[in-house]
Structures are given as structure tokens and as C-alpha cells.
Amino acid sequence: MKVSAQILFHSEDTPFTLKKSEKIVNVLLKFIEEEANYCGSINYVFCSDDYLLKLNQEYLSHDYYTDILSFQMDDEPIQGDIFISIDRVTENARNLNVPFEDELYRVISHGVLHFLGYKDKTQEEIQIMRKKEDELIERIKKNQFKI
């Protein structure tokens, strides 16, 4: 049974609402297709540091804040839930001296790249991941693709 492609955005314990969501969805779906994969259902959940910390502790036994947690349910089609801490994205943007929107696009891209099999444990993997993130950020900002 083929699952129809959908990327949805939700908020949990934060009033955050994503702007330009249709543009982001278009770019991500096209990118997933280019990577020779197809999308099932991906849920992005925007939340607070505390919410994400509880998930990190409960499911990964990690006791620290993070900007993103990805829980992949399947890889053909790619499906899963991606949780993003708006608190961490805000702080990262401030610390890196980049616009909030750019940092948010980076984290959104990072999650889907993990679902596509990209890793970030070694320096070489990190370089590849950053290059792909930068590519996706530019596509989102320029709205290069329409589906």
C-alpha cells in the first residue's frame, strides 16, 4: 500500500507557527524525489526545550538539551516524526549570528537529511551534511521548485 506524500507542521507546548510552510514542503518533497526516494508522512513538531529534553531523556537516555530529535518509522517511503526546539533554534541563531529563519531552515533540513541516510558523526559526514543543508536552505529561500 502506497502512502501519499505529506509533510505536516505542528506545535506542542509553544505558540510557534511556521511561515512559508507550503514553500518548504515543495522544496523538501522535490529534494526527497531527487534523492531517489519517496515521501510517506513526515511530521515536524515545534516545541520547547523542556518538551524536547523529556523526549531525549525518555527515548534516548540523554540528559541534555538539543535542537532536534528525529524518529524515523520507515525508509521506503520515508516516514517519521521530527521534533524541533524553537528555544534551541533561537539560541543557536543568536550564538551563530545568523537569522532565525536560516537556522530554522537548517534544522528542518537536517531532520529530513537524516531520514535520507545522511549521517553527522565524522568530520567528513558533517561536511557533506552541511553542504546539503546549505543547498536546501538556498532552495527554500529562493523557492526554486514547485510541485
Image (tube, rainbow, N blue to C red):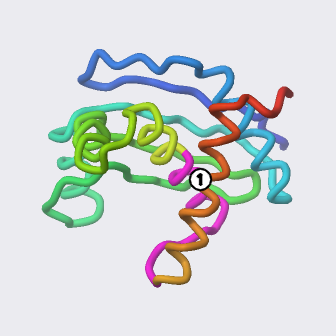
Q: Quadrant of the N terminus?
A: top right
x and y, in percent, of residue 17 in the image: 41, 16
Residue 115 is a magenta residue: yes
**30 lies above or below 101:** below
Q: Which residue is mark 1?
A: 134
At a point 59% along the width and 22% down the height, the residue shown is 21
**121 lies above or below 10:** below
- Part of the protein shown in magenta: 109-122
**Residue 27 placement, left or right of 14:** right
At a point 37% along the width and 31% down the height, the residue shown is 46
Mark 1 is surrounded, within 10 Å at the Cα level, by few (under 14), some (14 to 19) or many (20 or more) other residues, namely: some
Q: Quadrant of the C terminus?
A: top right
Residue 39 is a magenta residue: no
**Residue 140 placement, left or right of 10:** right
Q: How many marks?
A: 1
In the picture, residue 5 is in which quadrant? top right
Q: Nearer the viewer, residue 120 or 95?
A: 95
Q: Nearer the viewer, residue 127 or 83?
A: 127
x and y, in percent, of residue 117 in the image: 63, 68
**Residue 125 placement, left or right of 59:** right
x and y, in percent, of residue 108 in the image: 51, 43
**50 lies above or below 64:** above
Q: What type is the residue that disc 1 sits on?
A: Asp
Q: Secondary structure at mark 1?
A: helix
Q: Nearer the viewer, residue 113 or 98?
A: 98
At a point 15% along the width and 40% down the height, the residue shown is 50
Q: Residue furthest front?
A: 97
In the picture, residue 25 is in which quadrant? top right
